Amino acid sequence: MKETKFKKALGTLDEDKSYSTEEALELILKQPKRKFQETVDISVWLGIDPKKSEQNIRGSLTLPNSLGKEVKVAAFVDSDKADEAKKGGADFVGLDDLIEKYKDGNIDFDVAVTTPAQMKVVSKLAKVLGPKGLMPSPKSGTVTENIDKAVKEIKHGQVRFKAEQEGIVQGTIANVNMKKAQLIENFDSFINELKRLKPASSKGIYFKSVFLSTTMGPGYRIDTSQF
């Protein structure tokens, strides 16, 4: 029987081993290529209690190296900010017309941005955007006066993340067509941002576990002692 690409990739995995970042990324880059561009994803189990508001980590990060994928942005802004949004590269620009367009839940964008003044208007879509994780938020940098900058950073490859159940944070940090040095830069940036966001009330081990994987590949456990 022909060996599947997943089984081939799995053959490089030692489940009992904790890999250095460089070792794991080398193995990821050696995996068989697929017909589509796979992403490199990270999963981090943090020593926090996300049920406590002061430990509910959430944020955004513009990676040093672009993810290389198209991200569609909807800018919910009034006429004063419309040109700024278009200059930044927003795919959809408007306010009341966009509210009307998306009220039925047919979403055709990946990220929504708005200004503090328009949050009350955008909140009309809370029941639509909230469950999809698309509601603009100051913590993720998607509620801002600087719409031009926000849209450009999102288009470049901004990662948005938040702690889920049990304190697990997940995100996409790269794609398999990047060079190893670029992968390491993006990985380090993500880890350093989580370090920066460590709650003062978080006690004990902060990085409980870290895994790296591709879209269809196995997960490699990263040695957290290197952090």
Image: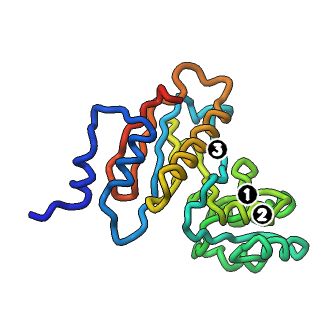
- For the residues labelled 2 and 3, say whether their Cβ atoms are less than 8 Å apart: no
* Earlier residue among tags 2 and 3: 3
Q: CA distance from mark 1 to mark 3?
A: 12 Å
First of labels 1, 3 by sequence position: 3
Residue drawn where x is 68% and y is 24% of the image? 200
Asked whether residue 95 appears in the rendered view, the answer is no
Residue with the mark numbered 2: 114
Q: Quadrant of residue 209?
A: top left
Identify the amino acid type marked 1. Thr
The crowd level at tag 1 (other Cα within 10 Å; few <14, some 14-19, many 20+) is many
Residue at 91% in and 73% down: 80
Above or below for 30 versus 85: above
Give neighbour class at mark 2: few <14, some 14-19, many 20+ (Cα, 10 Å). many
Q: Are marks 1 and 2 in contact (CB under 8 Å)?
A: yes
In the picture of the structure, the residue carrying the numbered disc 3 is 58
Amino acid carrying label 2: it is Thr
Which residue is the site of mark 1?
Answer: 142
Q: Disc 2 to disc 3, how far (Cα)?
A: 18 Å
Q: Is residue 182 left or right of residue 11?
A: right
- Residue visible at 27% across and 53% down? 9
Q: What colour scheme has been applied to the protein in the rendered image?
A: rainbow
Residue pictured at 37% horizontal, 51% vertical: 28
How far across and how far down the image is residue 172, in percent? 51, 54
